Amino acid sequence: MNGAESLVRTLLQNGVEVCFANPGTSEMHFVSALDRIDGMRCVLSLFEGGVTGAADGYGRMTGKPAATLLHLGPGLANGAANLHNAKRASTPIVNIVGEHATYHRDSGAPLCSDIEGLAKTVSKWVRTTETADRLAADCEEAIAVAQAAPGGVATLILPADTAWTETNAAIPSAGATHETSKVSDDTIAAAADVLRQAGPTLLLIGGDALTPENRQIAAAIAQAADADILAPTSNGRIDRGAGTVPIERVPYPIGIALDRLSKYRNAILIGADAPVAFFAYPDKPCRLLPEDCRTVTLAGLDQDCGDALARLSDAIGAPKSVPVPIPAVPPLPQDGPITPEAIGAIIGNLIPEGCIVCDESITTGRNFFASTHGAAPHSWLHITGGAIGIGIPMATGAAVACPDRRVLGLQADGSALYTVQSLWTQARERLNVLTLIFSNRSYAILKGELANVGANGGPTAMGMLSLDNPAMDWVQIARGFGVDGTRVDSTATLIAAIRHGFSVSGPYLIEVDLT
């Protein structure tokens, strides 16, 4: 076998069964190997941001890595934004990047670049394999690193000659396991001491602490200690809906966040960092908790959050569980104009059980959580790193991961334009993804940010934030990529369109006119 074949066999032997790809010349031997070795599902994207975003959605839903296949440094650069989001979500990904042959790397050819330098910004591990004989072992290590808590991007750089050179290297499997570490007894005692302090207390829970089982423990602790629980603003995955403990998030807008957190004098962080503002604003603090708030980290993302919560519960004598409230879903609105509140109510009523919601709704969907706490049980995936263009690819990867579940994409129109090509992948793969495009024909979030940073919004500035000259026809765009769709401008037509979109086989798009 050649190196490329050993790479594919190692991936399959270690449970990596899907490859999202946009290959080029340097990767042709890997592509050829896929024809000769059964078992790898190959999903083509027309843009590398679609490749990496799909791998992110797949990894969040399966808990195991997909492989990517990117072409040299520019291909990696095109995919880097969604690798950044995956890094912030702690998503396991084996990120394979083709490279010139080892003897051609310093030739000055047009596509020569510092691939390792690019990769280090979005990866927890980077390695260039120098020989075909090392490729299988390096691949196994990449898989192990990607899956080690808390998960992340492992980038394996593949020079073309290591792919085409013959090798007799053994195919490794079942590499070293990485057990999640448990926090110390002293850490448990310090957190218990915080819960005994006077003043309002916050439990900020993220990562694995957000599983339904761990939220139940956190809610019992909060009840026993008269504390509150919140999640970070953006989260890789929250399984939620009726029957689970409802949880709100730290608000995005700086003023609202500061006001919401101003009362706390104590905070315990479980799988989460202390909250900070997304950006710096004149005359506003970067850190959102008050300066005099006593803050203790109970468990980091790389530690066993569930075990830490259980031991903290025992330390303070909290009950093992608390009754789970079932918040009422707002009634379906009567026919009328489409507002964010109406959309939230409609989603809360219509998402089917087991739905995967991929949320890049940005401004429109800022308050959708409140309307969906009591919806049918579902999974909710956020844009985690702030790099827009994740929504449509993430929904694509989630649908590949879970073909038996419906996927709902809540998508801002401006962000959708970054990776709109992923609609074609949804059509090609016949994925059950319903995409709602919230068409306000602007970068609406930036209008608010103009005021937040104290800048003036004159005609030139406002023109830079407008997507209305010319306005885009999302139904025609979708059909150009092979996805059927419709445009709606009232709550009645939106309700009917969502019901239809969930009933059809394959992808469907609804342009929600908010102008």
Image: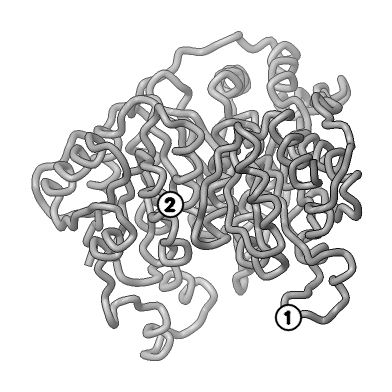
Looking at the image, residue 6 lies above or below residue 242? below
Q: Residue at x 41, y 51 (%)?
A: 366
Between 455 and 52, the residue placed more toward the observer is 52
Secondary element type, mark 2: helix
Q: Residue at x 51, y 52 (%)?
A: 44
Of the two numbered discs 2 and 1 on the same chain, state the one appearing first in sequence: 1
Residue 500 at x, y percent in the picture = 18, 40
Residue 18 at x, y percent in the picture = 59, 39
Type of the residue with mark 2: Thr
Q: Residue at x 70, y 46 (%)?
A: 274
Q: In which quarter of the image is the C terminus?
A: bottom left
State the mark number for residue 110. 1
Residue 283 at x, y percent in the picture = 62, 71
Q: In which quarter of the image is residue 168?
A: top right
Instruction: Residue at the far left: name it.
Output: 335
Q: In which quarter of the image is residue 295?
A: top right
Q: Residues within 10 Å of mark 2 (few under 14, many from 20)?
A: many
State the mark number for residue 61. none
Residue 108 at x, y percent in the picture = 82, 81
Left or right, 488 with reference to 359: left
Residue that badge 2 annotates: 425
> Is residue 133 at least partly visible in the picture?
yes
